[in-house]
Image: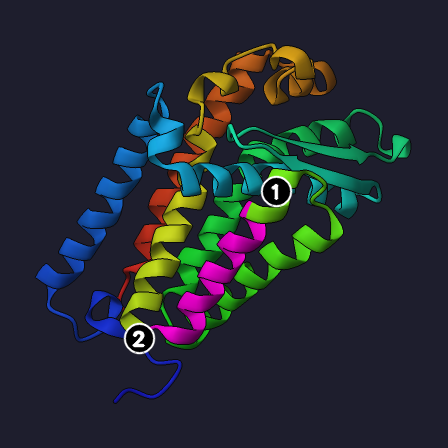
Amino acid sequence: MREPGKHFQPLLAKEAPPEVERMGLTWLIAAAFTTTILWQLPAGDYILYPFTILATWFHEMGHGLMALMLGGNFQKLEIFGNGSGVATYTIQTSLGPIGPGLVAAAGPMGPPVAGTFLLLASRSFTAASLSLKLLGGFLLLSTLIWVRSAFGFVAIPLLGLIILGIALRTPRWVQGFAIQFLGVQACVSTYHQLDYLFSYSAGPLGLSDTAQMQRYLLLPYWFWGGLMAIASLVILVQSLRVAYRSD
C-alpha cells in the first residue's frame, strides 16, 4: 500500500509502464474529443446531460465569482432543465470597461482554469480526494447561496452529492479517474455550444459573452471567441502534459 500523497493508481504512478500511461492519456483525449463533438449535435446536450448541467454551472459560476472578485455582487444563479443558465450580478463601476470585460470572459474561461487545478490534483491521491470533496461541497454551497431556480435546486445538489460519494466511498483508482475526467470536462466545457463563442447575440438574454467583450474591450467578438477556443485547448494540453509528467 502506498502512502497518501504519493503517486497513486498505475495511471499516474511514477513506476507505471509507459503503455499504461499512454492508454490513460489516450482515453482522456478521446473523451475530450468525443464530448466536444457530441455537444455540437442537436441531441448532444441530452446525451451528455449531467455534464451539460455541470458545464452550465461552471460557466455561470465563472461570471458570478469574477464579479465578486472585482468587488461586485453575485446575486443569483438560475439553471434550467434545457441546460441553459443565467448568472445575475453587479459590477463595480470604478473599474471602467475592464471589469465587465473580465466578467464576460470568466464565463467561458473560468471552467478551463478550474479544470487545470483538477487535472493537476490527480498527481497525488491526497490532492485528488480533497479536490473531489471541495468540488462536491462547493456545488452544495452554491445551491444554498446563489441557486434560485427550481431545477437548479434539484440538479446541482444531486451532482454535488454524487461527487462527494465518489470522494468518500470509492477506491483510490476511481477517485483518480473521476478527478481527471471532471478536469477534462471542465476544460472542454468552453466548447459547449461552440457556435455561442462566435455569436453576437444570446437571443432573449441580449449580447453574448464575446459580444460583451467586444463592447468593453473593443476587439471584435469573433476575435475573442477564437482566442478563448484556442486558449482552452492549450490549457487542456498543457495540464495533461504536467499531470502525466514523471517527477
Q: Quadrant of the N terminus?
A: bottom left
The image shows residue 3, relative to residue 149, as above or below, that is below
What residue does disc 2 label? 171
Q: Amino acid at mark 1?
A: Gly
Considering depth in this image, is 69 or 169 the residue closer to the camera?
169
Magenta span main SS: helix
Considering depth in this image, is 207 or 6 the residue closer to the camera?
207
Q: Is residue 206 left or right of residue 45?
A: right
The image shows residue 242, relative to residue 69, as above or below, that is below
Callout 1–callout 2 Cβ contact below 8 Å: no
Indicate the secondary structure of the residue bearing disc 1: helix
In the picture, residue 32 is in which quadrant?
A: top left
Name the residue at 39% across, 80% down.
Answer: 5
One can see residue 63 in this view: no
Can you tell which mark lies on residue 152? 1
Q: Amino acid at mark 2?
A: Pro
Residue numbers of the magenta segment: 155-171
Residue 61, position in %: x, y? 64, 43
One can see residue 135 in this view: yes
The image shows residue 195, relative to residue 60, as above or below, that is above
In the picture, residue 29 is in which quadrant?
A: top left
